[in-house]
Image (cartoon, rainbow, N blue to C red):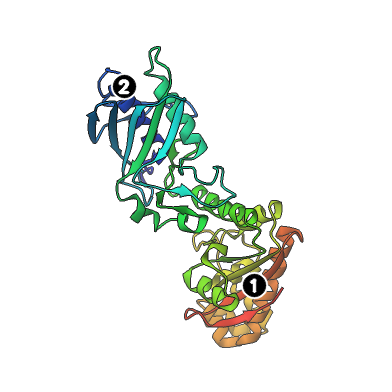
Amino acid sequence: MADLRRGWTTGSCAAAAAKSACAALLGQGFLNPVSITLPRGETPAFKLHTTEQGQGWAKACIIKDAGDDPDVTHGAVICAKISHGNSGLRFLAGEGVGTVTKPGLPLAIGEPAINPVPRLMIDAAIADVLEGHAPDFDVEISVLNGAALAAKTWNPRLGIIGGLSILGTTGIVRPFSCSAWIASIHRGVDVARALGRPHLIAATGATSEATARALYGLPEADCLDMGDFVGGTLKYLRRHPVERLTIAGGIGKISKLAQGAMDLHSGRSQVDFANLAEMAGVSAIRQANTALEAYGMAGPPLAGAIAARAKTVASDTVRGMVKIEVIVIDRAGAVLAQTGF
């Protein structure tokens, strides 16, 4: 199979657009293509999509290429508008870039959601074209249709309102990387802790999250879109604990957790039907094709045993730092087993 093609973060695109726009503002013309130096030394070049210029300002836009990663911002138009300021670099949220409204993120409340590393990248990119000029500029980053794209991300839960975050720590998007998803889980925990929220839900999917929310009446902001990354969730909570965590998922996913799996993806862990047969005392389960089929053979006692064992695995992983509950649901969202705390 051919190697997957890597891409560039929104932070890289914003830095390159800012460098080109700053060069135009200083009379050097728009740089096209425009190259920047990434935090680890790579020097990619970016082709401009559009440019604009007026009295005291210049704007450059770049189409984000996320490579072969299924990134929600792949193909998004990332723009930087540079105008003269008087107190160093001042970052502004343009159309489609969010604003921070909750504590716990690496930015203060009220700040544009342009993360610290992208800010440093933009600063360094602008410095490349200063030629003795003072670095006094207003830097407005915008993303075409960014508000609509943000609705498909964690931003609303994290209290980032109005658009996307400008992200990236290396400047590079590595295809199908788990790191961005896990980082979003971590930021969700950080925000919840900063707000003093005592009870979080970590769900493997939308149906299990809806069931757990209905049981407790918790807001969406108290839910972690854990997906398959139970290990990344629990290990972070071990170091950054909350009082209570409800883990909710379908019987297949929770069966894998009960086996000790920390990654619940079907390509990286499988249900052990021999183990389920032993737990239920029903030998026919060894021939089952799915955990739900096994449940049909053994009934509620199996679901209860799976939930209890999954709770033990999760509690051992957090080393007693968090009170754990496990809820097992079916595909329609009905509760098959619930351990309590």
| Residue occupying the point 69% across, 68% down | 324
The picture places residue 179, in percent across and down from the top left corner, at: 52, 48
Q: Mark 1 or mark 2, which has the lower sequence index?
A: 2
- Give the quarter of the image for residue 133: top left
281 on left or right of 50? right
Is 174 located above or below residue 81 in the figure?
below
67 on left or right of 253? left
> Could you say whether the residue bearing mark 1 is in a helix, strand or loop?
strand
Q: Which residue is mark 2?
A: 23
Callout 1: 10 Å neighbours few (<14), some, many (20+)? Answer: many
Q: Amino acid at mark 1?
A: Val
330 on left or right of 281? left
The picture places residue 74, in percent across and down from the top left corner, at: 33, 47
- Give the quarter of the image for residue 63: top left
Asked whether residue 196 appears in the rendered view, the answer is yes
Q: Which residue is mark 1?
A: 326
| Residue occupying the point 65% across, 69% down | 258
Callout 2: 10 Å neighbours few (<14), some, many (20+)? Answer: many
Residues at discs 1 and 2 in contact (Cβ within 8 Å): no
The picture places residue 233, in percent across and down from the top left corner, at: 61, 57
Instruction: Give the farthest residue toward the top.
Output: 132
Asked whether residue 250 appears in the rendered view, the answer is no
The picture places residue 238, in percent across and down from the top left corner, at: 70, 55
Is 215 located above or below residue 148 in the figure?
below
- Quadrant including the C terminus: bottom right
